[in-house]
Amino acid sequence: MSQELKSATGSAPRRSDEGVAARVRAIVDGVRTRGDAAVREYADRFDGRAPERLTPARVDELVASLPQQVVDDIRFVQDQVRNFARVQRESLHDVEVETLPGVVLGHRHVPVGSAGAYVPGGRYPLTASAHMTIVTAKAAGVPHVVAATPPIRGEVPAATVAAMHLAGADEIHVLGGVQAVAAMALGTGSVSPVDMLAGPGNAYVAEAKRQLFGEVGIDLFAGPTEILVVADGTADPLTVAVDLLSQAEHGPDSPAVLVTTSEALGRAVLDLVGRLLPGLPTNDLAGPAWHDHGRIVVCDDADEMWRVADDLAAEHVQVLTAEPRDALERMRNYGALFLGENTCVSYGDKVIGTNHVLPTLGAARYTGGLWVGKYLKTCTYQEVRDPATSAELGRVCGRASRVELFEGHARSGDLRAWRHGGDRIDWLDEIAPLGSPAPVAGS
C-alpha cells in the first residue's frame, strides 16, 4: 500500500470553468460578429497594443535585431524538430489493396489546407512553441500556416517572431489570447481563416479552442503542465528535485509528482526541494505549484510503482530507475517518456526534437500529443472495377439495407445487381422501361 510523504493541498486543476467559459464566449461572439473591429478592441484591452500583421520587411528587421547565437540556436532546435517530424511523416504510408476481385480500397494521408499556430507569451518569449506547431505543420505538408503571439510588455517579441518565421509561417500576427484564437478560427479582414488550431496557452486560450472545436479542428485540450518522476533507490535525489522544479515553474497550478519505491529518496527530495526553492528566480510560480500540487508517493514495490504511475496518466513522465526502458513495457498512459538521467523533460520542452504539445489532466489515457499526424486527414477511397463483383455487392447491399429498413440504400445496390448481374428487380419493373441490363460478365 502506497503512502504519501507529501500530498497536494490545493484543488485539482479543472478542464473548464464557468466564469472563464462565459468571458471567452463573449470574446468569440464579438470576433464572429464584428471581425477586426472586435479584435482591435480586445487587443487594446488585453494585449495593451494594437494588433499587427507583420510585413516581410518588419520580420527581417526583427530577426536582424537578435544576436546571431540566438538565431543559430533557433535553427538548431528547429532542425531537430523537423528531422523527427519528417521521420514520423515518412512512417505514414498511403495504402491500396484489392479486397475482392476488382474491388480496390485505399487511403491517403491528406494535409489540412491551413493551420493556425498559437504561440503563447505574456511573461516570456516562448519560442519553442513556434517550433512545435509550425515546423510540424510544414513537415506534414500544410500549405498555409497562420501564426499569432502576444506582445510582451507592449513590445513585439523578436525572438518569437524569428522562430515563427524560420519555422515557415506564412502569416505572422502580433496578437494574443482569445482574440487571436478566434480570429484565426473564424477569419477577419486581416487574419486568414484556418482549418485547425494548434498550440498551448492559458485557461482562456484552452477554453477558446474548446468552444471553437467543430468549426475548426484542434490539436488537443491542454491544461497546466505536469511532471511525474518515476524513480527507485538508484536515482540521484538532486536530479529528481531539480527536474521536478523545472516543470513547476510553468505556473502555480502545475503538478509535480514523484512516485518511488524508496522512502529515503522521497525524504531527500522533499528536503532538497525546500532548499532549492528560495533561490529559484521563478519561485513565485514554482513555489505555489509545489506547495499546492506537489506530491511524493512511496510504493511498496516496483509493480505498485508502475501501476500508480500509469494511473496518473501524466503529461511528462521522467523515468529514473535502474532499468528506465522498463517503462516502455510497463506503462501505456503518458504524454511523453524521458528515459534515464541523461535526458530530462526540459530537453523535450526546448531542444531534443520531440513535440512538447502533450495531453494533460488525464487525457493521456486516450490520446498522444501533437505530431505530424494531427495535421493529416486519413481519407479513404474505393473503386469497383469488376462488374460481376459489383453485382454481387449489390445483392448483399440490398439485403443488408432492407434489414435496417433503408430502402433507398437497397435500391442503389439493386441497380448494380440488375445492370451488371441481370437480376430481376420488382421496383425497376414498375417504372418506365429501362431497357435490358448489360450482359452478365462471363455469359
Image (spheres, helix red, strand yellow):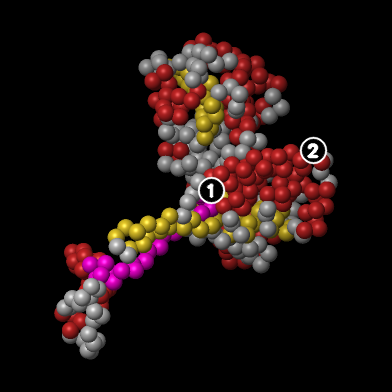
Q: Residue 407: which disc?
A: none
Name the residue located 32 percent from the left edge and 58 percent from the top edge. Answer: 99
Image location of residue 232, percent across then percent down: 49, 16
Name the residue located 19 percent from the left edge and 66 percent from the top edge. Answer: 399
Q: Is residue 413 magenta?
A: no
Q: CA distance from mark 1 to mark 2?
A: 31 Å
* Secondary structure beneath label 2: helix
Q: Earlier in the sequence, mark 1 or mark 2?
A: 2
In this view, the residue in front, 261 or 134, is: 134
In this view, the residue in front, 180 or 330, is: 330
Q: Are marks 1 and 2 in contact (CB under 8 Å)?
A: no
Q: Quadrant of the C terminus?
A: bottom left
Q: Is residue 389 magenta?
A: yes
- Region of the chain picked out in magenta, as a range: 372-392
Q: Is 367 above or below relative to 210?
A: above
Tell me the amino acid under the disc marked 1: Glu
Q: Residue 69: which disc?
A: 2
Q: Is 311 above or below relative to 322?
A: below
Name the residue located 71 percent from the left edge and 46 percent from the top edge. Answer: 163
Image location of residue 35, percent across then percent down: 63, 65
Q: Residue 90: which disc?
A: 1
